Image (spheres, helix red, strand yellow):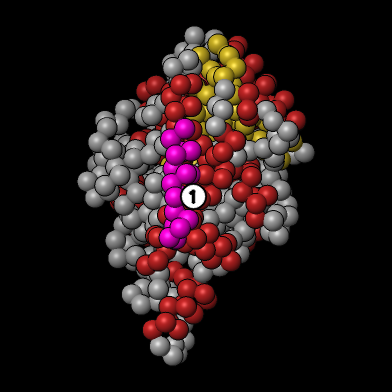
Amino acid sequence: MHQLTLAEIARGLADKKFSSEELTKVLLARIAQLDPQLNSFISLTEDLALAQAKAADARRANGENGALLGAPIAHKDLFCTQGIRTSCGSKMLDNFKAPYDATVVAKLAAAGAVTLGKTNMDEFAMGSANESSYYGPVKNPWNLEHVPGGSSGGSAAAVAARLLPAATGTDTGGSIRQPAALTNLTGLKPTYGRVSRWGMIAYASSLDQGGPLARTAEDCAILLQGMAGFDPQDSTSIDEPVPDYSASLNGSLQGLRIGVPKEYFSAGLDPRIADLIHNSVKELEKLGAVVKEISLPNMQHAIPAYYVIAPAEASSNLSRFDGVRFGYRCEDPKNLIDLYKRSRGEGFGPEVQRRIMVGAYALSAGYYDAYYLKAQKIRRLIKNDFMAAFNEVDIILGPTTPNPAWKLGAKNSDPVAAYLEDVYTITANLAGLPGLSMPAGFVDGLPVGVQLLAPYFQEGRLLNVAHQYQQNTDWHTRTPTGF
C-alpha cells in the first residue's frame, strides 16, 4: 500500500479495496520502522490520524467520494495545528501547542485528509539543506549521507521514502522545489496569494507560500485543489477562482512555447545537470512544444536582493519571540533586558540569528536606502524581466538546482555556498510567480529536477506540462533503495 500515489489511493478507497483506517495503520507502522534512519518527522499524531481515518471511512460509507477523503498526508511543522506542537524546527517553539488550525490544515481536514504528523524542517524555514533544525538534520533517502534539501526537507524525505503519499511544504526561496529536486519528487510553489498564509508561521511575509510535495504532478494537482482558495483572514490572499487542476492535466502540449533562459547555463551549473535539462527539453519537443532561447538579464542580482529582503522581513517577523508571551523563556532572568537577550540567544539557532542580524542591519537608519530599498528596486526589475519573457513564451524551463544533493555538513562552514544553491528558485518568489520542479534524471545516483515557471495563476499549465512529461518518462517512478 505504501507504493500507492495519492490518485491511486483515492481510486482504491472509492473501490473499497482497503479502508482509510487500514492504510493509516500501515503507514504509521512504516514510519515507526523507517523514520529513525531519516529523522523526517518532529511529531507523530497517531491518535488524531486514526480518528480522522475512521471519520473518513464513515463519510465514504455515507456516499461521499472526494479525492482527499481518507488520504494520509503530513504537514510541515510551521502550519499551526490545534492542540499539537508546532515547533518551526526551533527550540524557541519546542513547547508551543497552537490554539487553532492554519487555514491550509483546516481546509485539508475538511476535505477528509488524514494527518499522520508534523515534518522536520530548517529552523523557521531558514536553510537549503534541512540541517538547521533543533531536532537534528533530515537525511536524504537516496543516500543517507546527503542532505534532502530545505527547508521542507522533512516533508520531501518522508514522501520520497514512501512513508506517505504527499505532504505540505512552504517555499520562500525554493523550499518546496529544491528538496523536491534533490529527492526525486514533484513540488509546486503556487502564485503568491493563491494559498492562505494564515496560521503559517512567517519567515518572510512577501515571499512565503504554501504548496504540495508529492511523487507526481497528478498528486500535486489533487493536494493543491484542497489547499488553494481565497481566505479573508489573510490580507495577502487573492480572491481568484480556483480551477479544477486535475481537469487540465491531459491537455495537449502541441504549440506550447517554452523559453530556456541563456543565463541558466552559466559556469555554476553542473554540466551533467545541464545535459539532463536539455534531454527534458527534447522530450517536451517530441510532445509538440516549441522551444526558444530567452534572456532574464537581471537574474544575476537575485541572490543579493533576496538575501537582503528575506532577512529584513525575518528580523521583523521574529521580533515577537521574546520570552514573554509564548515559546522558550530563559531560566531566572535578572531583568527584562536579560530576559529578552537570553531567551532569544538560547532559543534561536545560529542560522536564524545570522539572518536576524543581517536583516536588522539592512533596515537600520542610514542603511535602509542603500540595501533594502535598492533590493526592492531589483525585485521589480526581475519581475519586469519575467513579464517581458512571458510575452514571448508560455512556460520557462531550466534546472531547479545547480548541483545534486551535497553531503551532510559539507557547506556548514560556508553559508554563502548553501545560499547559492537557491540561484534558480528565488526569482519566482521575488516575482510572486508559480513554479514547479519535477524529476528529470540522476547524477551519481542522486536525483535531479527540472524547473518550470509560468505566469500568475497558471498552476494548471505547470501541472499539465509536468503530467504530460511524466506520462512519457519514468524518472518519477524510481524508488530509493531500502525504501
Quadrant in which residue 387 is drawn: top left
For the point 60% across and 28% down, the residue is 398
| Residue 367 belongs to the span the image colors magenta | yes
Number of marks in the image? 1
In the picture shown, does residue 46 fall above or below 444? Answer: below
- Residue pushed farthest left? 232
Looking at the picture, does residue 460 appear above or below residue 83?
above
Which residue is denoted by mark 1 in the rendering?
A: 370
Q: Is residue 464 left or right of residue 179?
A: left
Residue 19 in sight in this render: no
| Whether residue 328 is situated above or below residue 202 in the rendered picture | below
Question: Residue 224 appears in which quarter of the rendering?
Answer: top left
Residue 273 x/y as whole percent: 70, 31
User: What's under tag 1, amino acid-wise?
Assistant: Ala
**Residue at 64% across, 45% down:** 420
Q: Is residue 57 magenta?
A: no
Q: Position of residue 98 (x, y in %)?
A: 34, 65
Q: Main secondary structure of the magenta part?
A: helix
Q: Nearer the viewer, residue 374 or 57?
A: 374
> Would residue 450 appear left or right of 229 to someone viewing this image?
right
Q: Quick check: 270 above or below 29?
A: above
**Would you call the spot at circle 1 few (<14 residues within 10 Å), some (14-19), or many (20 or more)?**
few
Estimate the x, y position of residue 316 in percent, counting from the top left.
40, 60
- Residue 240 at x, y = what percent? 27, 32
- Stretch in magenta: 363-381
